[in-house]
Image: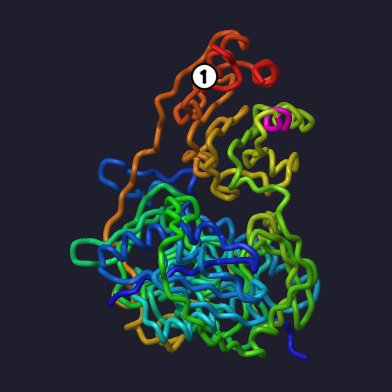
Amino acid sequence: MRDLTFIVLIKQVPDMDQVEFDYEEGRVDRSSAPLEPNPFDLNALEEAVKYKEELGGEVIAISMGPKQAESTLKDAIARGADEGILLQGREFAGSDTWATSLALGHAIEAVGDFDLIFSGEKTVDGDTGQVGPEVAEFLNIPHIAFVSGVKARKEDEVEVVSESWGATYVKSMELPGLITLTKDVNEPRLPSFKDKQKARKAKIANWGVEDIGIDQENLGITGSPTRVANMEVPPPEKRESMLLREDPGSAVNQLLEKLDLGRSK
Amino acid sequence: MSEVMVFAENNGERIHPVSYELLGKGRELTDKLEGDLSATLLSGEQLPAEELVYRGADRVYRGTDPALSEPVETSYKEALVSLISEVNPEVILIGATNFGRSLAPRIAMALDTSLTADCTGLDIDEEKNFVQIRPAFSGNILAHIKSRTSPQLATVRYKEFAEADRNEEREGEVVEVKVKISREGAEKVKIIEEKRGRRVNLEDAEVVVAGGRGLKKESDMQLVEDLADTFGGKVGASRPLVDDGWIEREHQVGYSGKRVKPGIYIACGISGQSQHLAGMKESDTIIAINNDPSAPIFEYADYGLVGNLYEIVPELIRQLKEGN
């Protein structure tokens, strides 16, 4: 029997705690923050590595982005991935979720046989959560989204917990398939110094349009079904705060009067 | 004639209320497009369709198949893709619930068409283009999206729009549709266990009382719980408390937790990081209790109680009980 192949979809994003927004110009200053792997994708990677540790096999991390996204794939290797593939080239830039999923889908087909694909539930910059299920549809495989727990890892099936229809479900899914992971699923491990050193020397495969056999008319801004017509950066919605600094008794009393709660005036 | 179609999510018993919000918004869009408003009701066993008519649907497409009794996206995708191909709606609105956000991308990819996630605003511009407005960058920006393909799909946030008015006089057509679902596809995902009703339903709570780092030890969560109980509300928490294991993650309010919009939100010992604000800033009334007068939370609150939460919270409970 062939080894299991796990694929992790991973995106490089700005560190959201540091990114700055220009409220007057209405733009995001992407250069203001360091880049890092999308936090939810680290949960996906951790889950793939756990699967590999339990049943053997190989973890391949795939990303689409500029050359500098190689560092995110090296980070993935330090955290347990065996290989990193970067879809790179100006043709890919500006792709929406449909075009991105099409490109990732083609890349996965180019990889060959696989068993389970892992992705984060969403990215912190795009916030859509659409790429995972769109990739699954492109590959014609089943998927389960918003997975908060993995209960059983098998060679031909995975058993997971996810929330849907206001209830919690335990579902099993035949492989090959795809799951998207929430933060609840695990605590991603930190890479050791040694692993980081090793990953720094790892070679990241750079694939272009020709390598994955995709029609470039389907990529980028022109190939995407949606486009951003304009963007607003609304200033944070501050409120006119009424501060009550008196002793607890009278502060609470004032508050309840304002709220018209619980007190007769 | 351009049709706006609303997907009426249901769990076999109850239609999710976001469907009525979509019918309300959908009516505004059809007025501008001079089109029809329809609803799609798919389920394992047949459900009554009148409510969707009372809420404004000119037409309800109703389809039934045992495979639709469970939340399995591929089955729903098959049913919807064949219906959409037949009816050709211009716009399709789906609630941005877990199920909707998981299902819609499959439909968009199957039809090679546009999909915008988690919209908070929808409009028709002067050229009759469908404009979809959505937050991105962890809620820090609003992007206005237009599509160049048809149909145009959007998932729409729950509790963003008002529910459509209910009018029992309203008339509409119920079209029974034949649903074709391949057994082979449906069997790839199996339900092993189902736990109905979550223990914590923060999203629908009228009052949320949340604890943060200002609490000194795990057992102090009791104070937050007592206050929530006094209000008849639910308990929330900021991320650090969840990360420390003081409370389950289903209580987490924030960007990577739940987004809540209660009538009253009380933040106890929460400093007000943007990750937390993203989950509660739309609450009707925000009350912050914190001993640090420079805590950012006070800038986002309607009322700020500056002081020791270990004195303020018990006093709040006492006075609330006294008043009742």
Viewer-proximal residue among A144 and A42: A144
Chain under label 1? Answer: B
Classify B269 as above or below B32.
above
The quadrant where residue B319 appears:
top right
Count of numbered badges drawn on the protein: 1
Residue at the extreme front: B169
Quadrant of the snapshot with the C terminus of chain A: top right
Residue A161, x across and y down, in percent? 72, 64
What secondary structure is found at the residue carrying circle 1? loop
The residue labelled by disc 1 is B293
Q: Residue at x 42, y 85 (%)?
A: B85
* Residue A95 visible, this orientation: no
Residue A179 visible somewhere in the drawing: yes
Residue lying at 68% horizontally and 64% vertically, measured from the top left: A162
| Magenta residues, start to end | B225-229
Q: Is residue B77 magenta?
A: no
- For this view, does A149 lie left or right of residue A7? right
Q: Amino acid at mark 1?
A: Pro
Instruction: Identify whether B69 is placed above or below B306.
Output: below
Is B227 included in the stretch rendered in magenta?
yes
Q: Position of residue B312 (x, y in %)?
A: 64, 17
User: Crowdedness of circle 1 by 10 Å Cα count: few (<14), some, many (20+)?
Assistant: some
Camera-side residue: B75 or A159? B75
Q: Vertically, is B100 above or below B241?
A: below
Please name the predominant secondary structure of the magenta segment in the image.
Answer: helix
Q: Position of residue B252 (x, y in %)?
A: 64, 44
Q: Quadrant of the N terminus of chain A?
A: bottom right
The residue positioned farthest toward the left in the image shown = B126
Q: From the viewer's perspective, is B267 left or right of B58?
A: right
Q: Position of residue B30 (x, y in %)?
A: 31, 66
Task: Indicate how the structure is coloured in the image.
Answer: rainbow
Left or right of B65? Residue B190 is right
